[in-house]
Image: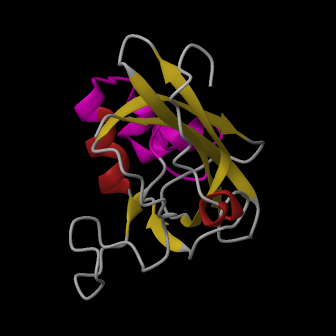
Amino acid sequence: MANDPQFESVLTDAMRAQVGIEGAPATHEVTTTGVRMFARAVGYSDPVFYDRDEARRRGYRDLPAPPAYLGTLVFNPATPDRTWGRPPGFSPRLDLPYKNTLNGGTDIEYFDEDICAGDVLTVRMKIEQLSERYSQALGGAMVISVTATTYRNQHDRVVAIMRGTSIAYGS
């Protein structure tokens, strides 16, 4: 790898084989309470996120989901993931030797159909890209992964894709 003749890759063939494989589905619900709470938490004051009559007057089926709100996971405490309650196999596991992780950014692509209260979204994640780079500032290698999380509504139409970049580094 550039600038480090001692660099040895930590990416295995098994890790690389996970690129493009979708994990198990999870269910997110978009509720009026969830829409209102998210809008309030981020400081939106537009009545469209709080008043159903106003939302319908503006052409929505119900309260529209504010930007970046993609429903709330239907929590199941019986799943092994006690923090989030996601089903086993939802998130890809890379088992990297690095303990430190940085958020490299998140981008949400929306499609033609509105997300509104009453929608039930099926959510699936996959690794879209996996690469390594040497960081002179960190004095070592970094693994950069890009995940794509697809949100489909109850009519099986894609309503959003969220892409997130994660940077793992250090030992």
Up/down of 10 relative to 106, above or below: below
For image coordinates 40% across by 31% down, the residue present is 103
Determine if the magenta segment contains residue 56. Answer: yes
Q: Position of residue 56 (x, y in %)?
A: 57, 44
For image coordinates 35% across by 18% down, the residue present is 138
The colour scheme used to paint the residues is secondary structure
For image coordinates 26% across by 44% down, the residue present is 37
Quadrant in the picture for the N terminus: top right
Residues rendered magenta in the picture: 40-69
Image mark count: 0
Determine if the magenta segment contains residue 60. Answer: yes
Q: Does residue 1 show up?
A: yes
> Farthest residue in the bottom direction?
78
Residue in front for this viewpoint, 122 or 103 = 103
Drawn side of residue 101 relative to residue 4, left or right: left
Q: Position of residue 21 (x, y in %)?
A: 70, 66
Q: Position of residue 28 (x, y in %)?
A: 46, 65
Residue in front for this viewpoint, 60 or 97 = 97
Up/down of 103 relative to 94, above or below: above
Quadrant in the picture for the C terminus: top left
Up/down of 27 relative to 99, above or below: below
> Farthest residue in the front direction?
6
Up/down of 83 relative to 168, above or below: below
